Amino acid sequence: MSDWYRDFANSGVGTTITRQFGLPRPAVLRRYEPGEPLLPGPAVIGTAGGGRLRDALTRLLRDAGVPVLSPVAADGSDDGERPAAVLLDATGVTGPGQLAAAHDFLAPAVKRLRASGRVLILADPPSATDSPATAAARQALDGLVRSIGKELLNGSTANLVYVPDGAEASLASPVRFFLSGRSAYVDGQVLTLSAADVPAGEDDETPLAGRVAVVTGAARGIGAAIARVMARDGAHVVAVDVPAAGESLAAVANEIGGTAFQLDITAADAPARLVAHLRERHGGVDVVVHNAGITRDKLLVNMDAARWNSVMAVNLQAQLDITEALLAADGLLRPDARVVCVSSQSGIAGNRGQTNYAASKAGIIGMVRAWAPAFAGRGATINAVAPGFIVTEMTARMPFGTREVGSRINSLQQGGLPVDVAETIAWLSQPGSAGVNGQVVRVCGQSMLGA
């Protein structure tokens, strides 16, 4: 869907007017296209502290065909090629004094960053130390990266990955995601990795080849985009939605060469029916995306029980019931399975008139965090994705003023697209994302609302 203001601001006359009046000019974001390089230009790597990941990062980038530049001078006077990505290895930082090295590297490097560039900081987690000074310095990087994200221009993003000692093998997949066009609308996010057995030799073009993926709520909107991206990445998609959406569901399944399965996920027999379908037709399942959700908005004091109960049943209880059934079905959920649950920015920040919806989406986050250890014990993962303002047919029906405010109050000054949510979910579904577990990734352009 077209963004009228972004398109106007990037036109000839629009560029002149926005500059003259100091108006924001949202960038056209760099989104992933199959076959494109990881980055459209070189990267630069700097260190603060011991920097134990620098060599691994350099190898990863060079293996991906990305040239690695030398850091520029502190005054930014170097006239060499501008970087498409700036990476700071801040592992080994032990106190606030070492953060000066982060500033000294980042300030000139970020100043030279290309449009739609990427800033990525890697560090040890604050929780992995008993030293208050060390924890303070590591936590400081959280505030640093979120602030950088708010300062960047031209569609660039900044994110932080905490890499515990022993989790180095989990690094490659998150680095590739955050540097690529797949993460176009993921900004100001903080991810903590865990140690895991990560398969070698993953195909970057079709990382889901040979895998069976269930996507609920797949008949339209974000669900249909998830199904398309999963199929593009090689998965056979079982597209699930209610019988009333059967025609649209069949169209999506036929488009991607998948399977349509009509199911009301709130029905008492829904988990058993889904388990039986997956066992009989596919022999198991590798990826489950809990995307189906509804809204029944009303102020709390005016909300009736039907509105409350229906939202809880679809958005939260169905996810619990289906996941429990898949876990209990012997051998159905394969050992390296991926479960991705769609939460929402409303579940983090809350939203007026959405107490039922926000509660259900916050509940998803609690569920994911509680289940993560059990999934790790099976060599599997469970994570959540929390979309912000995503441009869909539903948001297109909002009042103009509400829609414009919702789409602009983020660091990228625009609404996201369904494909942005889909790309993040597809990344979390990859075998190479084995070290990402129990995490919540916001796809919100670094919204000014919430954490």
Image: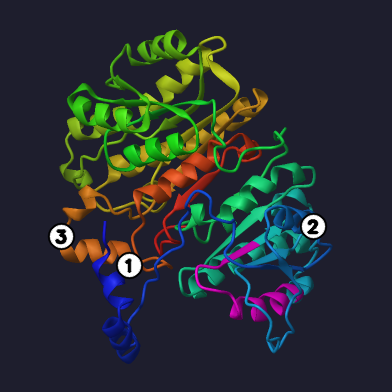
Residue assigned mark 3: 399
Q: Nearer the viewer, residue 183 or 81?
A: 81
Rendered location of residue 14, percent (x, y)? 28, 82
Q: Is 397 on the left or on the right of 279, as rendered?
A: left
Separation of disc 2 and disc 1 at Cα? 40 Å
Rendered location of residue 329, percent (x, y)? 51, 11
Asked if residue 414 can be seen in this view, the reply is yes
Badge number at residue 279: none
SS under mark 2: loop
Quadrant location, the N terminus: bottom left
> Marks 3 and 2: CB-CB under 8 Å?
no
Amino acid type at circle 2 is Ser
Separation of disc 3 and disc 1 at Cα? 15 Å
Q: Earlier in the sequence, mark 3 or mark 1?
A: 3
> Marks 3 and 1: CB-CB under 8 Å?
no
Q: Which residues are magenta?
A: 101-120
Q: Is residue 109 magenta?
A: yes
Q: Earlier in the sequence, mark 3 or mark 2?
A: 2
Amino acid type at circle 3 is Pro
Residue assigned mark 2: 131
> Marks 2 and 1: CB-CB under 8 Å?
no
Amino acid type at circle 1 is Arg
Residue drawn at 29 percent across, 71 percent down: 7
Residue assigned mark 1: 408
Q: Residues within 10 Å of mark 3 (few under 14, many from 20)?
A: few
| Residue 322 in which image quadrant | top left
Point out the residue furthest to the bottom here: 20
